[in-house]
Amino acid sequence: MAASHVLLGFICAVVVGGSGLPGGGGVGRGHDVLEIARAEVGVREVGQNGGKRVAEYLAYTGIIVPAPYCASFVSWCFGQAGYKEPRTAWSPALFPKDRVVEIASMPRNDERGLVFGIYFPELKRIGHVGFVEVVRGEWIQTIEGNTGPEGGREGTGVFRRLRHKRTISKYSNWLGNGKI
């Protein structure tokens, strides 16, 4: 009887938690980072690039409010998941050569938790970053800080967005070898 209760409890934990299921919250593939990012969707700025939660993202990377925070948001999420890296407020720094990956060559669903970067010609650099949540054909569902419903790089909070693959310049993988 006790064994059946333990087995039932385990099955419930897997089903409710999603751990180990496709799209679930298993550790080591970025799902924990994405769960943290998902919990932040809906955070809104106070003023421009300000507010308590935005200040926490920025403080994690040593920046004082107000300031753009998309890279700080990404870094903060990794930190909350127990990763030592990345820890930067500078979006181009999230794409060192040894972390850049080609999304087209990745197995399906392995792209979840990657960091994406959008290149801005007027800046001559990657000027906005966020997380790949899921790839749907030519479209990528993302979670990103310092954006808005219109998708700009100066937004009003943390949003879930849908972006076409052709708008993404680079992807980087911070999920391996970064745990404390």
Image (cartoon, rainbow, N blue to C red):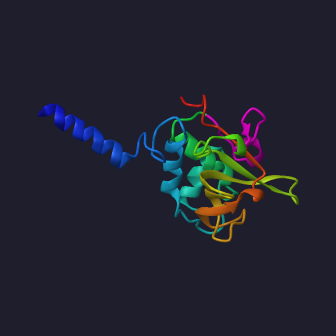
Does residue 78 appear in this view?
Answer: yes
Report the magenta residues as a range.
85-103
Residue 17 as seen in the image, left or right of residue 124:
left
Does residue 50 appear in this view?
Answer: no
Q: Where is residue 24 in the image (x, y as percent from the top left)?
A: 45, 46
- Name the residue located 56 percent from the left edge and 40 percent from the top edge: 79
Displayed quadrant of residue 138? bottom right
Q: Position of residue 19 (x, y in %)?
A: 41, 41
Displayed quadrant of residue 148? bottom right
- Name the residue located 53 percent from the left edge and 60 percent from the top edge: 41
Q: Which of 70 and 46 is in front in this view?
A: 70
Magenta-colored stretch includes residue 86: yes
- Name the residue located 70 percent from the left edge and 47 percent from the top edge: 89
**Which quarter of the figure is the N terminus placed in?**
top left
Instruction: From this view, report whether residue 107 is shown above or below residue 157.
Output: above
- Name the residue located 34 percent from the left edge and 47 percent from the top edge: 15
Q: Position of residue 5 (x, y in %)?
A: 17, 38
Residue 11 as seen in the image, left or right of residue 97:
left
Magenta-colored stretch includes residue 9: no
